């Protein structure tokens, strides 16, 4: 592989694919996040309740229940009775994210992702390096503590401090404590730990990564022989450790598919890659496109 020097993040993709082509999945994610969040504003603004509730538990058109599985687990351990609608709603969510990829929720639905992405962007602009190195297992400890605390107190503990719910509540009801929580997450990622909240501490992301262990939708380095080692994919990926096994592995030993449940399927590696090494595929499609020399030999 050739090594690119004096390289600005994403500049090659910008030249090759244009602005939209090098930001396509990012734009689609923002549209998706705004869409899901806006569904909850229809009722308060118009009186027509398209969706009631919040991202932890909702009812669409008084018919379709959706329940955050983590909230359901906490409710169970807290000793609460579980309504049938809540069970159905959790089952729908689990099936959906088992197909799409568990942490797809983190990058395509969760509004806090916008906050942490903005923090990471500013961190890069300011040239901030280093920070506290948190274990990626920490979020699973936080997840376990939430369940234990719910069992000990009889309350759904995480929902009391969940930044996602707090942000949604703040957007609907106005300025208040909600914005202090959001600001704290932003500043934590900016000055304390890069991608600290979503990649290391959030129990919601930890729970969805468990759901996504065997998910169908995956990113694959199908043209990994075209990689020019620019490292842009690593720079933009919120979980860069997931890329190496697919990109660097020997074809016979490690397939091109990113199988780690930590992957959020955000698509940014696809956006910023000028030679289009990556694309969305499924976990069973382990094919790698032959390199240019191999094509010439075949011809």
Image (cartoon, grey):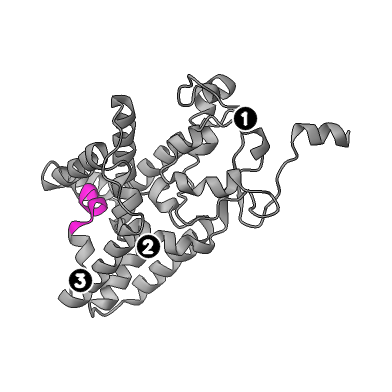
Mark 2, Cα crowd under 10 Å, few <14 / some 14-19 / many 20+, is some
Residue 277: x and y in percent read 61, 37
Q: Magenta span covers which residues? A: 161-168
Residue tagged 3: 149
Residue 295: in magenta span: no
Q: Residue at x 24, y 73 (%)?
A: 148
Q: Secondary structure at mark 1?
A: loop
Q: SS class of the residue under badge 3?
A: helix
Horizontal placement of 151 versus 223: left or right? left
Q: Is residue 165 magenta?
A: yes
Percent position of residue 203, x then y = 31, 59
Q: Position of residue 104 (x, y in %)?
A: 45, 51
C-alpha span from label 2 to label 3: 16 Å
Q: Which residue corresponds to mark 2?
A: 207
Left-right relation of 135 to 9: left
Residue 242 falls left or right of residue 206: right
Residue 60 seen from this side: no
Of labels 1 and 3, earlier in sequence is: 3
Residue bearing the label numbered 1: 275
The kind of secondary structure element at disc 2 is helix
Residue 74 x, y percent position in the rendering: 27, 71
**Residue 163 visible in the snapshot:** yes
Q: Main secondary structure of the magenta part?
A: helix
Question: What residue is rendered at 51% in x and 38% in y?
Answer: 269
- Marks 2 and 1, how far apart at CA: 34 Å
Mark 2 vs mark 1, foreground winner is 1
Say the numbered circle drawn on residue 267. none
Q: Earlier in the sequence, mark 2 or mark 1?
A: 2
Q: Are marks 2 and 3 in contact (CB under 8 Å)?
A: no
Label located before the other in sequence (2 or 3): 3
């Amino acid at each position: 592989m050739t090594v690119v020097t004096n390289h600005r993040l994403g500049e090659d993709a910008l030249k090759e694919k244009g602005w939209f082509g090098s930001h396509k999945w990012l734009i689609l994610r923002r549209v998706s996040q705004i869409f899901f969040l806006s569904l909850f504003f229809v009722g308060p603004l118009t009186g027509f309740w398209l969706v009631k509730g919040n991202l932890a538990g909702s009812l669409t058109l008084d018919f379709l229940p959706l329940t955050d599985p983590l909230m359901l687990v906490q409710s169970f351990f807290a000793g609460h009775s579980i309504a049938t609608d809540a069970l159905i709603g959790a089952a729908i969510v689990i099936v959906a994210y088992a197909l799409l990829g568990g942490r797809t929720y983190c990058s395509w639905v969760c509004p806090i992702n916008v906050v942490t992405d903005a923090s990471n962007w500013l961190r890069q602009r300011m040239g901030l390096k280093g920070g506290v190195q948190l274990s990626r297992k920490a979020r699973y400890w936080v997840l376990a503590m939430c369940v234990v605390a719910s069992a000990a107190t009889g309350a759904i503990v995480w929902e009391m401090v969940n930044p996602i719910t707090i942000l949604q509540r703040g957007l609907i009801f106005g300025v208040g404590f909600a914005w202090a929580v959001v600001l704290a997450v932003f500043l934590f990622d900016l000055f304390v730990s890069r991608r600290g909240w979503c990649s290391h501490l959030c129990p919601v992301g930890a729970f969805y990564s468990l759901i996504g262990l065997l998910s169908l939708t995956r990113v694959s380095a199908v043209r990994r022989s075209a990689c020019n080692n620019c490292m842009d994919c690593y720079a933009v990926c919120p979980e860069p450790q997931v890329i190496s096994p697919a990109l660097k592995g020997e074809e016979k030993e490690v397939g091109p598919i990113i199988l780690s449940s930590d992957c959020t399927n955000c698509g940014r590696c696809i956006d910023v890659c000028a030679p289009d090494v990556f694309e969305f595929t499924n976990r069973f499609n382990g094919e790698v496109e032959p390199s240019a020399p191999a094509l010439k030999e075949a011809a």
